[in-house]
Amino acid sequence: MLIRNAKAEWQGDLLNGSGQLSVGSGALDVPYSVKSRLEDGQSATNPEELLGASHAGRIWSVFNRETGQFKASLGE
């Protein structure tokens, strides 16, 4: 079984504080804040955005696997 690690740090109060999100592989190390979750034009990310990206990646992985199996059944 694969085990993945992630880390979230937060400093300050809820409205004025900020944090850092990172993953064990080093592929992601980004700031986040309440402003990044609620306001447009912020350069930081938010948990919802990361979750959406992970779902999109998984959906496309399954889609590509299925279309590859379909092509294989056609002899392509």
Image: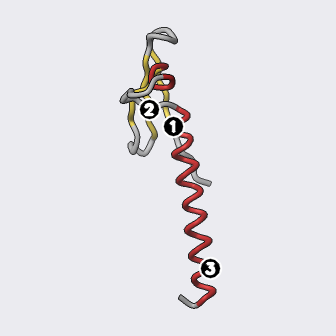
The x, y position of residue 17, in whole percent, is 44, 13
Residue beneath label 1, please?
49
Q: Residue at x 61, y 88 (%)?
A: 74
Dot 3 lies on which element? helix
Q: CA distance from mark 3 to mark 1?
A: 31 Å
Q: Looking at the picture, which amino acid does disc 2 mark? A: Thr
Residue 70 circle label? 3
Looking at this view, name the residue that lies furthest to the left. Answer: 43
Q: Quadrant of residue 51?
A: top right
State if disc 1 and disc 3 touch (CB < 8 Å): no
Sequence-earlier tag: 3 or 2: 2
- Would you name the residue on which mark 2 appears? 45
Q: Could you give the CA–CA distance between mark 3 and mark 2, rounded to whole angstroms?
A: 37 Å
Q: Percent position (x, y) of residue 59?
A: 59, 57
Residue at the limit of the structure toward the bottom, as seen here: 75
User: Is the residue 6 above or below the residue 8 in the image?
Assistant: below
> At numbered mark 1, what does the secondary structure look like: helix, strand or loop?
helix
Q: Identify the image quadrant of residue 48.
A: top right
Question: Tag 3: residue type?
Answer: Phe
Report, in whole angstroms, how far the alpha carbon at label 2 lies from the one at label 1: 7 Å
